[in-house]
Amino acid sequence: MSFLSSLADRDRVFDFLVPATSPVDVRHGPILYLEDVTVTFDGFRALDSLNLTIDDGELRCIIGPNGAGKTTMMDIITGKTRPDSGSVWFGSRHNLLAMNEPDIASLGIGRKFQKPTVFEALSVFENLELAMAADKRILPTLTARMSGESRDRIEEVLETIGLIELRHDPAGILSHGQKQWLEIGMLLMQRPRLLLVDEPVAGMTEQEMERTAELLTGLAGKGKQSVVVVEHDMGFVRSIARTVTVLHQGSVLAEGSMDQVASDPKVIEVYLGADPAEEVA
Amino acid sequence: MWLSRPFRERSTQLFLGVLLAALAAVTFLNLALPADNPFHVSTYTVTLLGKYLSYALLAVAVDLVWGYLGILSLGHGAFFALGGYAMGMYLMRQIGDRGTYGDPVLPDFMVFLDWDSLPWYWLGFDMPWFAFLMVILAPGLLALVFGFLAFRSRVTGVYLSIITQAMTFALMLAFFRNEMGFGGNNGLTDFRELLSFDLRSDATRLGLFIATGIALALGYVICRAIVASKLGRVSVATRDAEARTRFLGYRVERFQLFVFVVSAMLAGVAGALYVPQVGIINPSEFSPIFSIEVVLWVALGGRGTLYGAVIGAILVNYAKTVFTGVMPDAWLFALGGLFVLVTVFLPKGIAGLLGYRFRGHRFKGRHSKRRSSAPDTSTSDTSTSGTREATA
Ligand SMILES: Nc1ncnc2c1ncn2[C@@H]1O[C@H](COP(=O)(O)OP(=O)(O)O)[C@@H](O)[C@H]1O
Ligand SMILES: [Mg+2]
């Protein structure tokens, strides 16, 4: 019955019709819209009429004090948390509020959590292999043989994340920063359209931060991924961001270039008149 | 074909070469040398070695789930015993009317209990194909049901180990009961023929030894094929970071169930080969202590290597044979002491002594120096994965 009614549902794109590349419709520009999104936890408004638009291929940084709602916003986009009201669209075709977590992930939204978790006993290459989009049922996994195409894709991602020399080493020997890159590489294996990255440079060395900045700016672009970075390190944000969004008490306080934002009186007031570049975090 | 992949690995070639050479040598020393030659291997010894080989297959099965999937099963003795009972039931029915009571169908213990017909679950065991199928299916089915319930509820770590102990303990109590129809605490014994070969003849005993060696070789190859496949890498991923693996889109509980069932079936085959060689199967194989001993063999040999399990099973059981001959009461203390020594001085077991771990990769050797600095996940306590899961 549910199959029959799904046939009648004209909004639905059938699984077998969904092409391998994400079918997101970005002809109108933005890849992600959040409109008037409100989330309350026991009466507390974690997000309060939040509006946010991310353009296709954009690299956006989100900053804001602790508790501003940055993580909650990512939870909404990935389907982990449902908002009380508002709407969230991926391109102009997909209503994310009508989808569950795995479906949103397979649509091409990848999320990197703060703490990297890679498979330490497996090699860097094998970590990427497991992350690859593939038939993940038992028997196909047991008999899987890697195609030349998959191998090329893995090599390509290894190149992107700068771990090509270490590809046959166990992920356990990687430095903290390298593990973060591997984790980003694992997201890239699924060919996402939108990457959500939570605090990528926490605990990184100066050099690793620079490398990460290059990596993230290299990832974003038309026809490539759009990237949303939540970050506390202002130096890092200044080094990568074209547009910065400041969140405060669940809604957008200011938006613009880093310099615009840093000189915005509202932002300065929120940070008690201090230089936001020092105090935001 | 995925099953042929292990034959291209140097580690597997080496293992199979050593095993087959050992089988050939024992066969030669048993058949070709006269009994008074100091190098003659007696049939008694051949059977003893055959018993070790069946234990080795059981240890490989345990290592598959413990070493590569992170499931510390303390109940694999139950699967071994079920395979053994399936074989024992077939051997009982082969006795026919030559039992003490001369009943053409009923085994002696049923006549003794005044039963007048076979219980339904004994039907079909007079046919070898059916009995041999049950050797695999009975443990497989138990593992399927048990594993389905456990893995679906995401029971892992210490809790899983405890319920596997409970499972084998419950089965032991059940099989002790005469009304269950498996011979109570005496079990099944007085076997005569297997596929019409006389079980008391030297030739049959040598044949059983060789068959066990071949079963071990096949079991090893099957496990290697699983471990070296992408499914094996998913297993290792599950072992080390279950939640992360699930997040990548793998239905972790199904992979756990698959590997667990394969392992139980191998344990069943090991039990079936054990029974005709020792001549008896009774509920003591279900005892929780036995299952724990098997895990000790694997730990001593080196977890997560498969060949370490084989080495551990053979060495510990050889030591047990020697030791129980000299000081029978001290064996458990010796085993405990051995375990402490190996844990302290050889954390990777005997396999760790053998230098480097084969991982079935051509290019692995080049990086062995760097790898030594890697945190050793394979010997880490499985309970940590349970807590990691809980905090994730
Ligand atoms: N599951 C939840 N239940 C209750 N309160 C929550 C929950 N998740 C977040 N919050 C609250 O919502 C606010 C925003 O949190 P969060 O999105 O984590 O902020 P940020 O990531 O910007 O530091 C915080 O005050 C936090 O305590
Ligand atoms: Mg946060």
Image (tube, coloured by chain):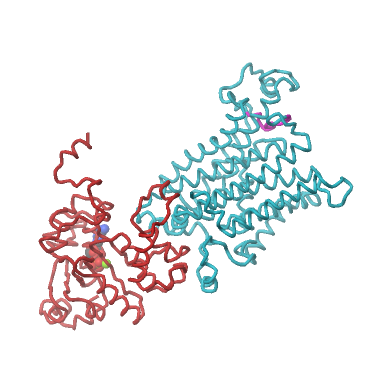
The extreme right residue here reads B36
Where's residue A58, x and y in %? Answer: 18, 69
Report the residue at 78% width, 46% height from top. Answer: B45
Report the residue at 59% width, 36% height from top. Answer: B82
Where's residue A254, x and y in %? Answer: 12, 73
The picture's colour for chain B is cyan
- Left or right? Give the position of B23 relative to B84: right
Residue B345 image-quadrant placement: bottom right
- Left or right? Give the position of A132 relative to B159: left
Residue A116 image-quadrant placement: bottom left
Q: Which chain is red?
A: A
Where's residue B391, x and y in %? Answer: 39, 59
The segment highlighted magenta reads B182-192
Give yes or no for residue B116 being in the magenta stretch. Answer: no
- Left or right? Give the position of B49 relative to A47: right
Report the residue at 69% width, 52% height from top. Answer: B314
Where's residue A109, x and y in %? Answer: 25, 59
> B12 or B280: which is nearer to us?
B12
> B264 or A192: which is nearer to us?
A192
Report the residue at 18% width, 37% height from top. Answer: A5
**In the image, residue A269 above or below residue B51:** below
